[in-house]
Structure formats: structure tokens, C-alpha cells
Image (cartoon, grey):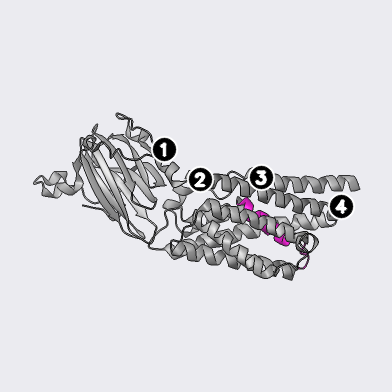
């Protein structure tokens, strides 16, 4: 019977660890489906995304698992978990609200080391191996929680947050994070409580904490490798040629530097300033079958953008999105499948204005020039879903 019980405990621990490892490639990442879902969603959507994000955040979960590993008193569990919660909540809200962005590879590398730290402290490594008094655990958990909050903020800022209800969006996301953490914590406490009754807990607990250190070091190497292979110069050299003559649903919008060395190839060059914490549109009028080749880049920050079109004469607010992403440049070609306005909405989440240099060629008419025409039939009625536009 004891053997069966040990097998059960080992199986449960293995499932938990494998669950963490299965999220290795996705821990903080926001999928395109999540990104699209949150664009038009309310605060409940931010709450849901926050909860699911924490439940797949393997590094945060490993850190919490390390915190409660040897805690048996409920008051101590509440005290230390609350300290971690306050720490990451402060930086999540403050950094996101003020547009403070740090390199997510470096932040995640430090978070990985925090997992190593908590496991090393569980093993009483400071006294055993360094012969020093361990730092105050409460202060360390608060400090490391602040760092975890920056990690959560970098991922939240990758989403197109609403300027009108920014603080509520952030608070909703953070509340979701806490709900996800509570759910994961409940499962951890059950697992550890059952495991602690086993006679082999003492031996296996040491193995588990050494494993946490190894996992933390592995995550640290993964993040530092990612940082070393994501320099700005490398990001800016990737390019792809536009493919003319494709339908709107297959718009080519790939990363690349505009071919400024050959300016004669472009018909128009337009500079658009996107204000801080705001957004703007720029549109062209295309008839059905017209081709628009484009290339744009910013002078600094990445922007969320929605490349879309609105049919002529439509009064319902309908528009068709061809490409949405967050980047500092894009290029491609569009063949219009309907007559109407076609162009971009850029959203700037940074605290400073960002300039966009847009280069275009093809058969089109700038919407800004339509006011000069006597033919009022060419003037598009502003779309109900259209945001701050340039006309």
C-alpha cells in the first residue's frame, strides 16, 4: 500500500512539473487569438486574459511553489503570498500606466534567477554552502515580486490598451492575475499537503528544490540566449519583398526597411505623428481592383496597427481588417476587393510622440485630398468605428 501511495504522489508531482515545462515556450507570450480577443473586449476580457496568463506563467508559478513549499501554517502562507502579490501588483500597475517598458528577455532572466533563489533558500543554502545568515525572506519576496510585476507589465503593454479606461483595464488584468494565482495556489497546497504525509517527503523535497534550481538556470539560459539573438540591428535587417496582385485577405505585411535608397520607386512619402498615449488613422481611396504598395517605419517605438478597409457608402460602421500586429515597420501590397477607404490605424502606448514615415505607390487617391474635389460623392463619411483620423 505504501508503494502505491508513493507512486501516486510521484505521479502527481510529475504531472505538475510536466505541466510547468509544457508551458516553457509560451510562459509569458500572448497568442494572436488572445490579442484579437482583448482588442475590443471590456474589463471582463482583461480579467479573463489575466487569469489564463498567470495559469500558463510557469516561472511565476514555480516561484510561488517555492514560497509555500515548506510552509505549514496558514497564516504564514497568507503572509508571504500576500507580500509577493503586493510586490508584483505595484510594478504591474505603475509600469503599465506610465508606459515603462523593459527588455522582456532580461526581465524574464532575472525572474528565472528568482526561482533559483527561493529554492536555494528552501535548502538553507546560505548557511550550508555560504556560511552566512540568509536575507530577510519577507523583504526578498517583496523585492522579487516587484521584478515579477515588471515581467507581467511587459506582456500587458504588448496589447492595445484602451486610452479612455487604461487604469481599469490594468486593474482588471491584475485582478485576473490574482484569481489565476489563487487557483494555482490551491492546487499546489493540496499537492504539497498530500506529499508531506509521505515518509519520503524529506528526501524528495530536497530533490524537488534542486530541480527548481536547475529549471531556473535553464530558463535563465533560454532568456539570455533570446536576448543575445534579438538585438535591434538584427530586427531591422529582416525584410521581404511585397507581392503585388493579391487579394485583400492575403495582404503581405512583412517586416522590412523601406527602400529609401531608391526613393524614385515610391509615389508619395508621408510623415504622420502619433501622439503619446493616443492613436491616428491615415487612409487612401481605392477603387475595386486598385493596387497599393506600401512601406512604413517609425522613428522609435513599436506601434500597434490595424491595416483595414471600409466600403464606400457604408453607414453601419463595418470595416475589414487585413493585418493587425505590433511592430515598428511593415511593407507589402494590397489589391482592393471593394471600393472605399483603405489604410492604417496606429496606436502609440508610449509616453512620447512617435513619427511614422509612410511610403506608397499605386492607383489611389489620398483621402486628405478629397476635400479639394467638387465631387462630393467621393468624400467618405467618417466610420462609426474609425478612431482619430487624418483628413
Left or right for 144, reference 135: left
Residue at the far left in the pictured view: 374
Question: Which of the two discs, 2 and 1, labels the residue nearer the N terminus?
Answer: 2
Q: Tell me where residue 345 appears, x and y as whole percent.
A: 32, 49
Question: Which of the two discs, 3 and 2, labels the residue nearer the N terminus?
Answer: 3
Rounded to the nearest angstrom, the CA distance separating label 2 from label 1 is: 22 Å
Question: Which of the two discs, 4 and 1, labels the residue nearer the N terminus?
Answer: 4
Seen in the picture, residue 377 relative to 84 is either above or below; the reply is above
Left or right for 356, reference 196: left
Rounded to the nearest angstrom, the CA distance separating label 2 from label 4 is: 40 Å
Question: Which of the two discs, 2 and 4, labels the residue nearer the N terminus?
Answer: 2
What residue sits right under mark 3 in the picture? Answer: 21
Q: Are there few (<14), some (14-19), or many (20+) residues within 10 Å of tag 3?
A: some
Q: Are there few (<14), some (14-19), or many (20+) residues within 10 Å of tag 2?
A: few
The residue nearer to you, when weighing 244 against 259, is 259
User: Which disc is residue 97 wearing?
Assistant: none
Q: Are marks 4 and 1 in contact (CB under 8 Å)?
A: no
Seen in the picture, residue 255 relative to 37 is either above or below; the reply is above
Seen in the picture, residue 131 relative to 4 is either above or below; the reply is below
What residue sits right under mark 1 in the picture? Answer: 238
Rounded to the nearest angstrom, the CA distance separating label 3 from label 2 is: 18 Å
Residue at the far top in the pictured view: 245
What residue sits right under mark 4 in the picture? Answer: 200
Q: Are marks 2 and 1 in contact (CB under 8 Å)?
A: no
Helix, strand, or loop for circle 4?
A: loop
Rounded to the nearest angstrom, the CA distance separating label 4 from label 1 is: 54 Å
Q: Tell me where residue 261 appears, x and y as whole percent.
A: 28, 38
What residue sits right under mark 2 in the picture? Answer: 31
Residues in magenta, as a range: 57-73
Q: Tell me where residue 308 appears, x and y as whole percent.
A: 32, 43
Identify which residue is drawn at 51% across, 45% down: 31
Helix, strand, or loop for circle 3?
A: helix
Amino acid at each position: 500500500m505504501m508503494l502505491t501511495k508513493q507512486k501516486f504522489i510521484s505521479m502527481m508531482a510529475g504531472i505538475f512539473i510536466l505541466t510547468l515545462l509544457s508551458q516553457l515556450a509560451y510562459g509569458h507570450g500572448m497568442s494572436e487569438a488572445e490579442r484579437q480577443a482583448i482588442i475590443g473586449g471590456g474589463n471582463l476580457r482583461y480579467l479573463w486574459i489575466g487569469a489564463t496568463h498567470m495559469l500558463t506563467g510557469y516561472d511565476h508559478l514555480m516561484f510561488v511553489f517555492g514560497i509555500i513549499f515548506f510552509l505549514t501554517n496558514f497564516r504564514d502562507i497568507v503572509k508571504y503570498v500576500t507580500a509577493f502579490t503586493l510586490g508584483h501588483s505595484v510594478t504591474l500597475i505603475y509600469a503599465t500606466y506610465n508606459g515603462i517598458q523593459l527588455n522582456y528577455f532580461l526581465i524574464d532572466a532575472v525572474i528565472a534567477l528568482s526561482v533559483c533563489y527561493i529554492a536555494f533558500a528552501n535548502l538553507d543554502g546560505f548557511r550550508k554552502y555560504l556560511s552566512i545568515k540568509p536575507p530577510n525572506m519577507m523583504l526578498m519576496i517583496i523585492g522579487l515580486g516587484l521584478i515579477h510585476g515588471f515581467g507581467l507589465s511587459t506582456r500587458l503593454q504588448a496589447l492595445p490598451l484602451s486610452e479612455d479606461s487604461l487604469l481599469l483595464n490594468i486593474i482588471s488584468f491584475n485582478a485576473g492575475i490574482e484569481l489565476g494565482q489563487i487557483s494555482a495556489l490551491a492546487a499546489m497546497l493540496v499537492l504539497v499537503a498530500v506529499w508531506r504525509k509521505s515518509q519520503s517527503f524529506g528526501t524528495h523535497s530536497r530533490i524537488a528544490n534542486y530541480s527548481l534550481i536547475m529549471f531556473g538556470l535553464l530558463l535563465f539560459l533560454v532568456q539570455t540566449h533570446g536576448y543575445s539573438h534579438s538585438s535591434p540591428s538584427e530586427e531591422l535587417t529582416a525584410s521581404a519583398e511585397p507581392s503585388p496582385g493579391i487579394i485583400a485577405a492575403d495582404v503581405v505585411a512583412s517586416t522590412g526597411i523601406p527602400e529609401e535608397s531608391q526613393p524614385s520607386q515610391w509615389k508619395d512619402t508621408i510623415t504622420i505623428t502619433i501622439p503619446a498615449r493616443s492613436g491616428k488613422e491615415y487612409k487612401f481611396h481605392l477603387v475595386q481592383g486598385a493596387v497599393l504598395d506600401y512601406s512604413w517605419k517609425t522613428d522609435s517605438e513599436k506601434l500597434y496597427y490595424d491595416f483595414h478597409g471600409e466600403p464606400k457608402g457604408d453607414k453601419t460602421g463595418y470595416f475589414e481588417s487585413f493585418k493587425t500586429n505590433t511592430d515598428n515597420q511593415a511593407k507589402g501590397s494590397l489589391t482592393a476587393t471593394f471600393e472605399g477607404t483603405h489604410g492604417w490605424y496606429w496606436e502609440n502606448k508610449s509616453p512620447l510622440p512617435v513619427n511614422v514615415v509612410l511610403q506608397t505607390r499605386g492607383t489611389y487617391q489620398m483621402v486628405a485630398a478629397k476635400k479639394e474635389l467638387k465631387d462630393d460623392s467621393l468624400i467618405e463619411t467618417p466610420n462609426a468605428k474609425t478612431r482619430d483620423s487624418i483628413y
